[in-house]
Structures are given as C-alpha cells and as structure tokens.
Image: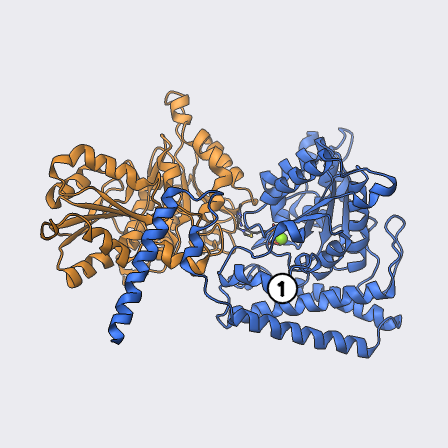
Chain colours: A orange, B blue
C-alpha cells in the first residue's frame, strides 16, 4: 500500500467504521465540507451524506452532550473536538455524564462513543492549541483514554475504540499527523490496551505515549551513539487502563525508568506510572523513577515551545542521573 | 413567507406553507432550509430592521431611530481609520506568507463594524475582544505592532488591558462574553452607571466582541443571562460575518441573531456592518443606554468575512466566489470614500495623504515584525503566580543551567 500518514490512517479508520456499522456517526465543528481543520474527516460527508457526517453548531458541550443522547438512542457517535483546549467547554459532559452513565444506571445504559481530541504541542500553534490534557481524563473513572503514536496504531486503535462498549477519549498527537509509515490498511496492530516495546534495550526503560514516542526513539538512538547506553522504549498506547504488566516486565529487566510526556510534570500522568513502578518493581530499581515533561507553566508562546517540550537533550540528562555504577 | 411567520408558533387554523390542511402546529411551523436562510438574511438588503445610514453606493440616508450628527472631520477620521487598519491587516497576511508570522487572522471586510463600534467607546469603557478585532484595538490606542507578538509567536498579547481598556485577544470561542458581563456588573456595583449631572461624564460601559459562530457557545448564552438579570452595562457586539470557519450562520441559528435578545429581555439591533456611520450610531446609542443603566444591548453587525478564516484556512473548500463578489459591492471603505468625494468632504489630496500614511504604517509594521527579538527562555517561567512557586523556580534554575552548559561548550570550542 505504501506510505500512509497518521491523518490518512485515521481518515481511513473512520471511513471503514462508517461502512461497517450504520450506527456510526461522525460530527463536530467543520468536519463536513471542510473535512476538519486537520482533514481527518475529509471526504466522509460526501461519501456517507449529511446524516452520517455533519457539521455541528460551535458548542463543545453540545457536541459531547448530544453524543451522549445519541449513544443512548443506539448510535455510536464519533465526535471531534477541534483542539485540546477547546474540549474544556465539554468537560462537564465528559466527566459527569459520559463517564458515569453506565455506573449510574447500574449497567442498564451503555455509551459507546469516541471523543477524538487532537492534543499536544510542537506545531507552533497560538494559545490554547497545544495542551496536553490527558491527566484530566485519566483521572476520571469510567473513561477509557488511549493515544496512538504511529499510523498503523492510529488506524487499528481508532477502529477498536469505535467498537468499544464504553466512552473512549481518543487523543491524537497532532504534531505526528503528517508522520508517514509503510502501512498496509486495514491494519490490525496489538489490542488497544496493550503497551508495546518499540525498541528493545537492557539499560533503561523509556516510557512514552502519543507525540513523545518518536521523541523517545530519537533519544534512545542518541543514548546509544553518544553514551553507549542500550535504551528500551515502551509505547504505552493506553493510558487508562495502563498495561502494568508490559511496563513492569520492562522495568524489572532494565532496573531504570524514565517517563516522558509533554504535559506539565506536577500531577501529570507520569506520576501514576511512577507510582505503579514503585509499587510493583521496587526491588528491581537501581534508581528512582524519573520524569521528563513540560514545565509547570501555562503553555508558552510558539517561539518558546521548543524549550518547554521534552527533547533528546533533556531526556539524556535525565538518563544520565539514574545513579549509574560508574558514578557511584 | 416572512420569517416572522415561522418563528412564532402557528395557529391550528393556519394553513401549512404548501397550502395543504395543517397537521400538528409544531410540524407545520418547521421552516425549510431555504426559509431559514432567507430569514437569516431577511434584513440584509435594507429591510426595515437593518440600520443603515450610508448605502453601498455611498448615499447618506436617514434613519428614524439612529440618526447621528457627525462632523466632516469625524468622517475623514473614520475613513483614515479604516484604510490604515486594512493596510496593516493586508501586511499581516503578506508577512505570514513570507514566513515572518506563524499565522494571521484577517479582518478584511469588517473594518466598518469595528471602527464604528470602537470610535463609539470612551476611554473609561472596556472592550473584551475575540481574536479578529484589529480595528477595535486600533481605536483603543493599541498600536498594530502590538498585535504581532501573538501571530509571530513571541507572546500572548503585549498590551495592558488596564491602561488601554482593551482586553487581550480571546481565542477560546465565547469566553469573553462572560468576563465582560462580570466586568460590567462590577461597573454597576461600583456606581459607575446611571449617574446624572456632573458625574454622568464618568459613567462607564463594557463592550464584548464575538462572532456568529460564538453565539452557539454556552458561555455567550450565560453571559447574556447574567448581564440581563444584573442589568449590567454591557453591549454584546456580534459581528455576523456569515461564517464560522467553514460553517454558514444557518448552522448556528434559525432566527436572525439580533432577535435572540428579546428572549433575554433586552434590545437587539441589526446594523449594516459595512456601514461605519451606522455602526457608530447604533453602538453609541447602545453604550449610552448602558451608561444610563438601561443595559445590556445586543448588536448584530451584518457583514462578511472577505478573506479566509485565517492564513491556515482554504475557504475555496467550502464557499463559492459568487457571494464574495456580491459583498465586494458593499465594501465598507469604498462606500465612505464615494460619499466623502461626492459630498466634497475630502479631496484627492486628503485621500492621497491617507494612502501615504498607510504605506508608512505598513512599512513600520513590517520593520517592527522582522526585527522582533526572540523571547528569552526565562520569560516562560515568570508570572505564573504572584509569588513564584518553588517548583517553577527550581525548574527555571535547572533549565537555565542546562542551557548554560551549551554556552560553555560553544565557548570551549572557540579556544
Ligand atoms: C471553544 C472553541 N472551539 C473551537 C474553536 C476553533 N475555532 C476558532 S475560530 C472558530 C470559528 C469562529 O467563528 P465566529 O464565532 O463566527 O467568529 P469569526 O472567526 O467568524 O470571526 C472556531 C470553531 C475555538 N477557538 N474555541
Ligand atoms: Mg463568523
């Protein structure tokens, strides 16, 4: 099939899902004629008609709130938030309604719906276009939160998310939308909730997801060539639930762990991973679990984001501080 | 069928619009898509509800409620405002194309709406803008160069809302309407509204700017609810430029937007947004109403987004050129120019001098832009809290040390 971008993979996943299940609906701001500001829904309105893929009024609480209602009626809505920070007006619908309805109705009502959110920085976006909001969602019981890092996963995980029984917050690393890979679509990768080893190594485990997987891979390569360290990279893929077994197997093997994410470190998702590692791998650790993330500041203006976002240099620094034998 | 027909519930004895016997009242009142569009635009061609003082041909017309006296100097001033603001706007687009700006948000076509509204404000008033309000910023004394930081990516807006009476640009759609309502409530609570006699000159008002798309947002609805129940002195100035990125106004509403005000209990007025005089007249009236304690007021400025949504947008994907061509005939600057010349309010020398000034502004704007310094990294760590948090302080120190490491090694390489 050849080179496929993540954007194309997502588009194909939506198309195939619309074809496979007449209950699947796609809606959100500008997803119709325009095909979405990132063109993820390109061509869907033309192919499936206004009933299946349509532009919504400019109201995110409305988008998610009506999706809840439609899911109750038997549809499988797949809605788009235009950017990470523009999902906040929908926060109440996501956390108080979508996340809880199964529990409140003791299982009588199921909400199969997907909330797609392009997230993270690195595209030089003006204010509010670069947030990493994953921890708000992972902190909400009832939500499933996943984030693909490759075109193949984007296809496979989105399809799986659409068939899931519970609401899925599907976080798309927007800076990787145009990343290409050799993929044969339809692609079926590992199950959505499984973490995968992207690069095997023996010295230290780098844990990342979404946009930071590629960064972690670069850092791993630099660690090999510059420092002679053999770094293992784990792509978490699913943030809630977390695939503890894969994470812990890797950390037990290497004895060292660094978690990388774009979001601010304080109260960030990395804290959850670190706690899990401490709980399950304590006796295997050679050094405290390290976290590399965005600083604890409001997302800075585009000219400063290269400083704010984790990059190879900062990851190598964190690795260097993991109490290596030669430093002891 | 007039739009009023289907916006009120139909009586059981009424015929449905296709002439057959009526079914349930609610069903027979449902408008077709064409009727919705016709209703939304019903007053755009000069119908009774559209306030216009200057026709697209530059003809001065009178209006029973909103006529104003303006001096020749004021007219020339507003012409100059519009030409300069448009010129800076076009330069912004060009700078983006040349890679000097990350993005630009064009105001092209909306000059009259913004200059009319902006010139109706007094220094003590407060504006809460969205992100397209370059004309309002100009009227508030914010130099166009101060807009550049946002679009070049060096800051989030460099002007001081307190000294300029102009809030920062608001990108999250609709947020500012609630903030404006709260600010206006403050003005009322502090007794800066409704004073008479010697104090009346100090009366204050607030105005918030937002788009047609924004009217769907919960924050805008809530802003109107709050402003109404607290009699807040706030003017909701909605620029209906017909588009919210790729979505036409009929995706947001069935009724003309100004009519929504009635539901909140305050007046709504639709003004020709390409007529600077009408925009001035209506906004001045609305702000005065607010200052007198009769706020809030909704103004719908009926206009058109002549350019793409932003420089990142490709409008050809969703709209036809026909519309654009039709709106070109209603150009806000051209109609005032024709009027000034026909009425001999301005001569060629004046028009030339404004053009020359626009050239100078464009040059200054460009020079400023390309010479903007890169923000130093330590900047992003400051002003997070009144008192710096120890977490951020430590991060700053670590990171600057990290950067210093490179400075040393670079210096080392020179030796
Ligand atoms: C809460 C929120 N959702 C989505 C967006 C993305 N967005 C930016 S501008 C825009 C359209 C706004 O249309 P309108 O209110 O008519 O203002 P205009 O751009 O036409 O001036 C959208 C959807 C946003 N900025 N904020
Ligand atoms: Mg608009």
Q: Quadrant of the N terminus of chain A?
A: bottom left
- Quarter of the figure with residue B30: top right
- Quarter of the figure with residue B329: bottom right
Q: Would you say A252 lies left or right of A139 here?
A: left
Q: Secondary structure at mark 1?
A: helix
* Nearer the observer, A176 or B153: B153
Q: Would you say B199 lies left or right of A145 here?
A: right
Residue B375 higher or lower than B18, as above or below: below
- Residue at horizontal 22 percent and vertical 35 percent from the top: A276
Q: Residue furthest front?
A: B415
Is disc 1's CB within 8 Å of ligand 1? no
Residue B210 seen in render: no
Q: Would you say B131 lies left or right of B13 here?
A: left
Residue A87 seen in render: yes
Write down the chain letter for disc 1. Answer: B
List the residue tagged with mark 1. Answer: B144
Count of numbered badges drawn on the protein? 1
- Residue at horizontal 56 percent and vertical 70 percent from the top: B368
Return the x and y of residue A88 as percentages of the image width and height. 48, 40
* Nearer the observer, A225 or A168: A225
* Nearer the observer, B341 or B43: B341
Return the x and y of residue A71 as percentages of the image width and height. 44, 33
Q: Would you say B133 lies left or right of B117 here?
A: left
- Residue at horizontal 37 percent and vertical 54 percent from the top: A308
Return the x and y of residue B156 as percentages of the image width and height. 52, 55
Return the x and y of residue B383 as percentages of the image width and height. 48, 48
Residue A27 higher or lower than A180, as above or below: above
Mark 1 closeness class: few <14, some 14–19, many ≥20 residues within 10 Å: many
């Amino acid at each position: 099939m050849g080179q496929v971008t993540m954007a194309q993979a997502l588009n194909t996943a939506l198309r195939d899902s619309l074809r496979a299940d007449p209950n699947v609906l796609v809606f959100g701001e500008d997803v119709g004629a325009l095909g979405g500001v990132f063109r993820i829904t390109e061509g869907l309105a033309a192919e499936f008609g206004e009933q299946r893929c349509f532009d919504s009024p400019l109201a995110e609480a409305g988008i998610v709130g009506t999706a809840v209602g439609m899911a109750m009626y038997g549809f499988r809505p797949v809605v788009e938030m235009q950017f990470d920070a523009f999902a906040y007006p929908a926060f109440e619908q996501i956390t108080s309604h979508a996340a809880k309805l199964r529990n409140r109705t003791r299982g009588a009502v199921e909400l199969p719906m997907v909330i797609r959110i392009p997230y993270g920085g690195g595209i030089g976006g003006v204010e509010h276009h670069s947030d990493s909001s994953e921890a708000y969602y992972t902190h909400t019981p009832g939500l499933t939160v996943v984030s693909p890092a490759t075109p193949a996963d984007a296809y496979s995980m989105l399809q799986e998310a659409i068939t899931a029984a519970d609401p899925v917050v599907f976080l798309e690393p927007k800076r990787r939308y145009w990343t290409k890979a050799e993929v044969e679509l339809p692609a079926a990768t590992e199950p959505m909730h499984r973490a995968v080893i992207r690069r095997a190594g023996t010295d230290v485990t780098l844990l990342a997801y979404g946009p930071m997987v590629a960064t972690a891979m670069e850092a791993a390569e630099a660690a090999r060539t510059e420092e002679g360290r053999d770094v293992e990279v784990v792509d978490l893929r699913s943030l809630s639930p977390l695939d503890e077994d894969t994470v812990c197997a890797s950390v037990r093997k290497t004895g060292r762990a660094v978690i990388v994410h774009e979001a601010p470190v304080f109260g960030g998702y990395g804290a959850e991973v670190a706690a899990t590692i401490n709980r399950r791998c304590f006796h295997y650790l050679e050094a405290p679990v390290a976290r590399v993330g965005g600083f604890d500041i409001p997302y800075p203006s585009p000219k400063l984001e290269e400083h704010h976002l984790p990059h190879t240099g900062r990851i190598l620094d964190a690795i260097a501080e993991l109490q290596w034998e030669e430093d002891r | 069928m007039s739009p009023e027909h289907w916006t009120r519930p139909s009586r059981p004895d009424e015929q449905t619009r296709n002439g057959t016997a009526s079914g349930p009242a609610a069903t027979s009142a449902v408008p077709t898509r064409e009727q919705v569009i016709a209703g939304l635009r019903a007053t755009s061609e000069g119908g009774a509800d559209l306030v216009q003082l200057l026709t697209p041909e530059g003809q001065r017309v009178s209006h029973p409620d909103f006529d104003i006296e303006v001096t020749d100097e004021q007219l020339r001033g507003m012409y100059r405002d519009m030409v300069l603001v448009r010129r800076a706007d076009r330069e912004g687009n060009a700078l983006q194309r040349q890679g000097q700006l990350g993005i630009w948000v064009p105001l092209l076509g909306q000059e009259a709406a913004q200059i009319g509204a902006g010139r109706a404000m007094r220094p003590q008033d407060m504006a809460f803008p969205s992100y397209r309000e370059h004309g309002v910023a100009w009227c508030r004394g914010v130099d166009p160069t101060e807009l550049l930081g946002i679009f070049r990516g060096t800051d989030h807006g460099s002007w001081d809302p307190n000294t300029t009476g102009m809030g920062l640009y608001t990108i999250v759609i609709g947020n500012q309407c609630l903030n404006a309502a709260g600010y206006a409530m403050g003005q009322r609570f502090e007794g800066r509204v409704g004073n008479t006699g010697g104090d009346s000159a100090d009366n204050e008002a607030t105005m918030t700017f937002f788009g047609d798309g924004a009217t769907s947002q919960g924050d805008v609805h809530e802003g109107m609810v709050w402003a109404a129940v607290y009699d807040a002195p706030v003017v909701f100035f909605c620029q209906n430029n017909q588009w919210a990125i790729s979505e036409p106004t009929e995706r947001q509403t069935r009724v003309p937007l100004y009519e929504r005000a009635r539901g909140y209990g305050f007046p709504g007025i639709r003004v020709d947004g390409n007529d600077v005089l009408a925009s001035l007249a209506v906004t001045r009236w609305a702000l005065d109403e607010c200052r007198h304690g009769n706020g809030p007021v909704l103004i719908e400025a009926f206009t058109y987004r002549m350019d793409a949504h932003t420089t990142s947008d490709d409008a050809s994907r969703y709209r036809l050129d026909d519309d654009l061509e039709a709106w070109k005939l209603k150009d806000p600057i051209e109609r005032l120019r024709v009027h000034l010349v026909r009425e001999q309010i301005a001569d060629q020398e004046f028009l030339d001098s404004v053009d020359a000034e626009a050239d100078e502004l464009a040059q200054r704007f460009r020079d400023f832009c390309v010479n903007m310094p890169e923000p130093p990294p330590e900047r992003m760590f400051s002003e997070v809290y009144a008192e710096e948090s120890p977490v951020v302080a430590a991060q700053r120190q670590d990171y600057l040390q990290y950067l210093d490491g490179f400075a040393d090694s670079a210096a080392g390489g020179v030796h």
